[in-house]
Amino acid sequence: MSTFQDLGLNEDLLKGITDLGFEKPSEVQEKAIPILLSEETDLVALAQTGTGKTAAFGFPMLQKIDVNSRTTQGLILSPTRELCLQIANEMKAYGKYCKGLNVVAIYGGSSITDQAREVKRGAQIIVATPGRMKDMISRRLVDITKIQYSVLDEADEMLNMGFKEDITEILSGTPEDKNTWLFSATMPKEVARIAKKFMLDPKEITVGHKNESTSNVSHEYYMVNARDRYQALKRLADANPDIFSVIFCRTKRDTQKVAEQLIEDGYSAGALHGDLSQNQRDIVMKQFRTRQIQMLVATDVAARGIDVDDVTHVINYQLSDEVETYTHRSGRTGRAGKTGVSMVIVSRSEMRRLKSIERIINKKFELKEIPNGMEICEVQLKSLANKIHTTEINREIDPYLEEINTLFEETSKEELIKKFFSVEFTRFFNYYQKAKNLNVSAGDSNREGRSQSSGSATRYFINVGEKDGYDWMKLKDFLKEVLDLGRDDVFKVDVKETFSFFNTEKEHQEKVLAFFTDYKDNGRFVNVEVTEDRGGRGGRGGRDRNRGGGRRRDGGDRRRRDDKPRGDRRSRRSDDNSGNRSDRRRNNDGNSEGRERRGDRDKSVFKTSHSRPTRSRRKD
């Protein structure tokens, strides 16, 4: 492997590299930097998260720009505020000895006036989120007509968050002869289209294989029933006393809920999601970096700015709907040459998605078992013993030793050790001694599917469908949210043009029907009835109206699966109601966090813990 001196960097940058403690370039840096320094070319670089992509484009840009000019010459677009700030701070650190360098971060949640003032002072490099950048361009607060180098960092995530139009509009206002450098962990079709539109015969480099996870991360999965997911999370935390982790949830609502549960149960935890204000997010990240928070519960989008080298575990509390997202999640650990563990808590119904992820990352998941109570007691006891053994003696305790020694003068060394460690051991033993086995046998993996299609499940009809802006995933999220059910408690969702079907276990039937009695959305009744159809796709099972709930209030009718009117009744749909759900946002981070120009919302309760308190109040 070459050194940074071999890559052709100038003395100012080499001095900054020495101060940062960098010794040898990573593979992506070794491949990208010589190309970008020696040629005026476009570049597409695919590399896993945590492989040093910022330095790969940062050093060449810093060396090529004219720091004596106040003209903006470099533009770096990134998906989130946290990542934007991280890149800006790293660029400043790289260019520490470049006199006159001014790098400005532009992102939502902070004063646009202050950011405009910084740009006006002469910003050679702007690091920005697409939403705020587009806003400032429209207000004529920035000038990007003389940009020489543009970077799309985490391009796949920006497009996944819905920034395609913003990126297109921003880049359209830059010179055609600029160099565009695209860095991404995965290469979906949307990224390829952007590259084709704004790049001319780009050079391509790939570190590892496309979408492949880094080799520093081991991948494990734990199979449990959906209702036991949170208990499994707690046991995994207890079985790893020194855990320093990021826990991923699908939605902001689940993220906040899990974080609050962990805090209530005595864990040092905090939430990071798009409904927090910028100040709250900054506080959470500061506490996480200083390890005041051991377990950071985050959404996929919010976690894009997490760059902490010592994360020991990534826990996928829920799998993302996009299988490619797993690559980004697992990349939060195993950074800077360290090893890490990516854990996935799955129910039996999610095994197919896990297999899809295996194919994408080109890695196999190892099936592990959730530890039982005695195993956790043993781990905690050994951890305590090790901490005591390595603890340095604080001499401030000396004045109190005489009284303590008097108390234990008739206690033998062996008995004293037993008493001391029994304090911690008894706490965990009492908590876990009657705890059930959470593991689900892999041999029973088809049992869940059988039960869901048998008499233990109830099939429902609901009078909303594709014309209301739903697909199966959005309808499932809606039902899960309003009924306060687990994600796996709603299944076999089948969305048609003007109506849909879904299943729950029979135990939830009364709750479902009661909730949708007289339920209105935007002034329109949403009705749910039990149907005799059991979820066979393409079938024409009729509904048993005598068992139905959710009374009809406006004389309308629903349609059968073949979308033909039943009798002389007419569909309740009116033109005024058509599409009235199409703009609904269902805890989707790509819609709320990605669109910063809509403004930050500060409506979630922010809760965190400054230290790990006692866990005597736990509930299983």
Image: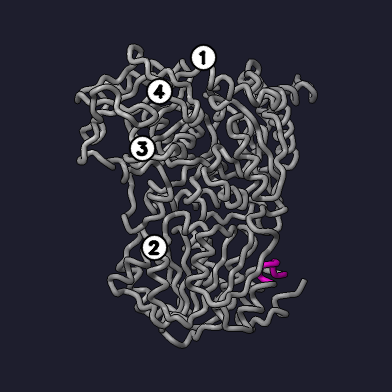
Q: In this view, does 4 lie above or below 615?
A: below
Report, in whole angstroms, how far the alpha carbon at label 2 lies from the one at label 3.
28 Å
Residue at 20% across / 40% down in the picture? 576
Kind of residue at badge 4 = Tyr
- Mark 1 or mark 4, earlier in chain: 1
Q: Position of residue 458 (x, y in %)?
A: 45, 19
- Mark 4 or mark 3, earlier in chain: 4
- Is residue 199 in view from this perspective? yes
Q: In which quarter of the image is residue 545?
A: top left
Badge nearest the viewer, 1 or 3: 3
Kind of residue at badge 1 = Gly
Viewport quadrant of the C terminus: top right
Residue labelled with disc 4: 460
Q: Alpha-carbon neighbours of circle 1 within 10 Å: few (<14), some, or many (≥20)?
A: few
Q: In this view, does 544 lie above or below 210?
A: above
Kind of residue at badge 3 = Glu
| Local SS, label 4 | strand
- Mark 1 or mark 2, earlier in chain: 2
Residue labelled with disc 2: 165
Q: In this view, does 174 lie above or below 266?
A: below
Q: Position of residue 408 (x, y in %)?
A: 71, 23
Tell me if residue 103 is in the magenta stretch: no
Compare residues 28 and 378 and report the one nearer the observer: 28
Report, in whole angstroms, how far the alpha carbon at label 1 lies from the one at label 4.
13 Å
Residue labelled with disc 3: 497
Please tell me the numbered disc located at residue 285: none
Residue labelled with disc 1: 455
Residue at 69% across / 43% down in the picture? 219
Q: Alpha-carbon neighbours of circle 4 within 10 Å: few (<14), some, or many (≥20)?
A: many
Report, in whole angstroms, how far the alpha carbon at label 1 lies from the one at label 2.
48 Å
Tell me if residue 28 is in the magenta stretch: yes
Residue at 36% across / 13% down in the picture? 547
